[in-house]
Image (cartoon, grey):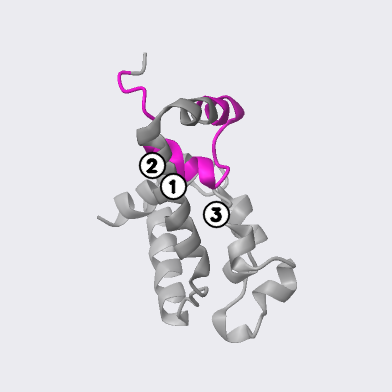
Amino acid sequence: MIKNPHIAELVDAYLLDALEPHERERVAQHLESCEACQAEFARGEARLRTLRALPPVEVSSDLLSATEQRLAAAWSAHDSDSSPASTSFPRSAWERDPRCSASPASGHDVERQSGRSHAERGNELKPQQRSRTTKWLFGTFA
């Protein structure tokens, strides 16, 4: 049972279309009648407009290399049950994004390759996928 009927914590996921259909319907219904959540929704829309107006950030080759090394070390420290092949991480969004498969120095044009700009693609991972991946990455290196 939900103790707090407000949906403020779901507004960003709703705006990014990252909710399951039943959650999305619940949020939409709640927004019809709750002024507090309508205000939060308006703030969320403003946040999203601001973020989408920012230019894409290119990751440095040093950061990519350091991250790859840390990931390789973390994988080797885990037993075989935690190998990349047996762990379900949200890889599909990473594989679809050309920035994740090409080095920054390779001259790839993300918008030309994907046919969509960074802002149009939005966030392809659901919040629970990002959370699980972030916890794994930062939990491993903490």
Q: Residue 123, labelled with which disc?
A: 3
Say if residue 87 shows up in the picture: no
Query: Is disc 2 surrounded by few (<14), some (14 to 19) or many (20+) residues within 10 Å?
Result: few
- Secondary element at image label 3: loop
Classify the position of the C terminus by image quarter.
bottom left
- Foreground residue, 93 or 81? 93
Query: Would you say the residues marked 3 and 2 are in contact, meaning their CB atoms lie under 8 Å apart?
Result: no
State whether residue 13 is above or below residue 20.
below
Callout 1 environment at 10 Å: few (<14), some (14 to 19), or many (20+)? few
Image height of 30 relative to 93, above or below: above
Is 142 positioned to the left or the right of 122 in the image?
Answer: left
Give the number of the mark in front: 3 or 2: 2
Please name the residue shown 61% across and 54% down the image.
93
Q: Which mark is residue 39?
A: 2
Does residue 112 show up magenta in the picture? no
- Picture quadrant where residue 138 is located: bottom left
Estimate the x, y position of residue 75 in percent, counting from the top left.
43, 54
Which structural element holds mark 1?
Answer: helix
Amino acid type, label 1: Ala
User: Type of residue at label 3?
Assistant: Asn
In the picture, the disc for residue 102 is none
Q: CA distance from mark 3 to mark 2?
A: 22 Å
Can residue 120 be seen in the rendering of this structure? yes
Q: Which mark is on residue 42?
A: 1
Q: Earlier in the sequence, mark 3 or mark 2?
A: 2
In the rendered image, residue 4 lying in the magenta stretch gets the answer yes
> From which residue to which does the magenta span run?
3-26
CB atoms at circles 1 and 2 under 8 Å apart? yes
* Tag 1–tag 3 contact (CB < 8 Å): no
